Image (spheres, rainbow, N blue to C red):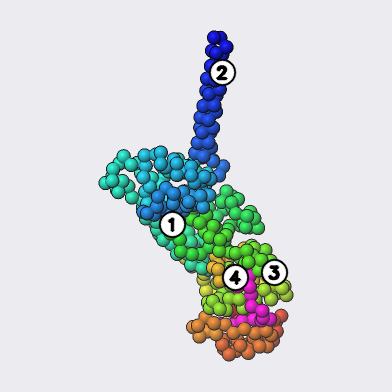
Amino acid sequence: MVRVLTQGLKIVTVVMVAILSVSGSIWFFDYWQDRELAGERGRPVIVQVAPEDDAGAVSDKLTDAKLVQFGWYFEGRMRFSDVDLRPGTYTLRTGMGVMDIIDTITVQTTFGAEEAAEEVVQEPFQVTFIEGQRAEEFGAQLEAAGMPNGQAEFMAALNNPDIRAGYDFLDGVPDDASINGFLFPDTYNIPADSEAADVVYYMLDTFDDRVTPEDRAGFEAQGLSLYEAITLASIVEREAAVREERPTIAAVYLNRIEQGTVLNADPTLQYAAGTPEEWWPTLGDAELAMEGPYNTYINPGLPPSPISNPGVASIQAVANPADVDFQFFVAKQDGTGEHVFATTYEEHQQNVCTYNPPACEGAGLPPSLAAAPVTGGRWMLV
């Protein structure tokens, strides 16, 4: 009898241990999936829940965005929660727990159909950031679109070390420099609950996606780091008005960099002279004589940082420049935005006299590059 009781107790003990082990495993798995990762939370990810989406469709989106590790777990928690999906565009963040995500994108089923229908999500607002603009202009656009303190917060985010740490391609940016140049210009549908820093994340994510491995290999083939390549692309973006000319303009600058000569690029001086009243001012003799690292009439090579945020055409032009020996170009001054290119200084002199006669008047053209004064050399590359 005692033996039977002992065996029974052993069986009960084994069963209880098994139940506790399974329960503990389930509890730990729930905890592990639902915990908020404080060290990872913060990077925003835009997720759209369409009216026709079910838990499975949203699970796939969350898994693809690496917001959840196991889609089946999200689906299971959805099915056992008294909630319905709420269509809309959401800003979710890496490190969010599964239940935190569910709470954000759902409405309680107990509300009833009429109440649930009233639980609408604010529509995202659309902002188009134009190629060739500087970060300050992007920030002003955000504020104009209705984001409170958009410009100040946007500019502050550019120097946020936590944002930089999430992108390997920013490793080459000096610690004391902003990430102007890497803010990819495009049309963005921004969730209404986004902060200015979130927009910086969106733009950096787009940059990382649109600047391809082939582009980066092209920069390396030109002897440029990514930071140098984007700096050059930012100049090409401001200098070129005709898309087809970008590879040729990039080639001219690369040829001059290889020779160790000055770029004579007006946009770099405009960047240095820009103010909130006019970010890209017309240059006069005073600006052309400005001292500082952005005066590419007196400093050879590239300026210390990008001056604008280039689009894909200018970036690809630097990665794949035209195979030409041109050293000079001058604008046709006919309203087309086109340029005429030359290999020798003598050819360039002829082009300047043809397309920009005022530069040939008075004292005439300098007899050589070495003889060209700073204030009189502006026409050399315009």
C-beta proximity under 8 Å, tags 2 and 4: no
The earlier-in-sequence mark between 3 and 1 is 1
Camera-near label (2 vs 4) is 2
Q: Position of residue 175 (x, y in %)?
A: 63, 54
Task: Answer whether residue 168 is magenta in the image.
Answer: no
The three-letter amino acid code for the residue at tag 2 is: Lys
Which disc number belongs to residue 316?
Answer: 4
Mark 1 residue type: Ile
Tell me the SS state at disc 1. strand
User: Which residues, given as a range, are shown in magenta?
Assistant: 316-331
The residue at which mark 1 appears reads as: 190
Q: Given the image, on which type of amino acid does mark 3 rest?
A: Ala
Disc sitting over residue 10 in the figure: 2
Q: Which residue occupies the foreground of this view, 51 or 228?
A: 51
Residue in the image at 63% along x and 55% along y? 168
Decide: is 58 above or below 189. above
Does label 2 or label 1 sit earlier along the sequence? 2
Residue 186 screen position, x and y as percent? 49, 64
Residue 308 is situated, as x and y percent measured from the top left of the image, at 55, 66
Q: Which residue is mark 3?
A: 221
Residues at marks 1 and 4, CA–CA distance in whole angstroms: 27 Å
Q: CA distance from mark 3 to mark 1?
A: 36 Å
